[in-house]
């Protein structure tokens, strides 16, 4: 999946992607995807929709 890299200022494929749960409004859980940029190794983050 693609995400925006803040350091490169471009959309790139996430390397080593892993789905995590983060806190949402009202105590709910929100799905998100985290990984690293293949070019500069900066941490990337993308919020996903509901299941």
Image: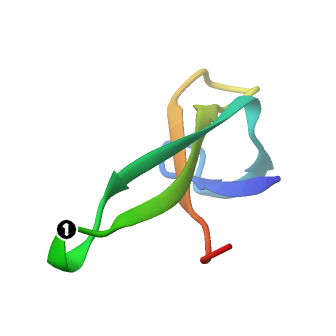
- Find residue 7 and report its horizontal and vertical position in percent: 49, 42
> How did the renderer colour the structure?
rainbow
- Find residue 32 and report its horizontal and vertical position in percent: 53, 54
Residue at the extreme left of the image, as rendered: 26
Residue at 61% in and 67% down = 48
Splitting the image into 4 quarters, where does residue 28 fall? bottom left
- Find residue 49 and report its horizontal and vertical position in percent: 61, 76
Number of numbered discs visible in the structure rendering: 1
Number of other residues with Cα within 10 Å of mark 1, as a class: few under 14, some 14 to 19, many 20 or more: few
Q: Does 15 sit above or below residue 49?
A: above
Residue at 82% in and 53% down = 1
For this rendering, which residue is in front, 33 or 14? 33
Residue that numbered label 1 is attached to:
27
Splitting the image into 4 quarters, where does residue 40 fall? top right
Q: Does 16 sit above or below residue 43?
A: above
Q: Does 40 sit above or below residue 1?
A: above
- Find residue 45 and report its horizontal and vertical position in percent: 51, 49
Task: Please state, as top left, top right, bottom left or bottom right, where the C terminus lies in the image.
Answer: bottom right
Say whether residue 26 is left or right of residue 28. left
Query: Dot 1: what SS?
Result: helix
For this rendering, which residue is in front, 7 or 25? 25
Say whether residue 31 is left or right of residue 10. left
Say whether residue 38 is left or right of residue 18. right
């Amino acid at each position: 999946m693609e995400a925006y890299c803040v350091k490169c200022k471009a959309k790139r494929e996430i390397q080593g992607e892993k789905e995590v749960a983060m806190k949402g409004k009202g105590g709910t859980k929100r799905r998100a995807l985290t990984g690293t940029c293949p070019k500069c190794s900066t941490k990337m983050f993308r919020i996903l929709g509901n299941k």
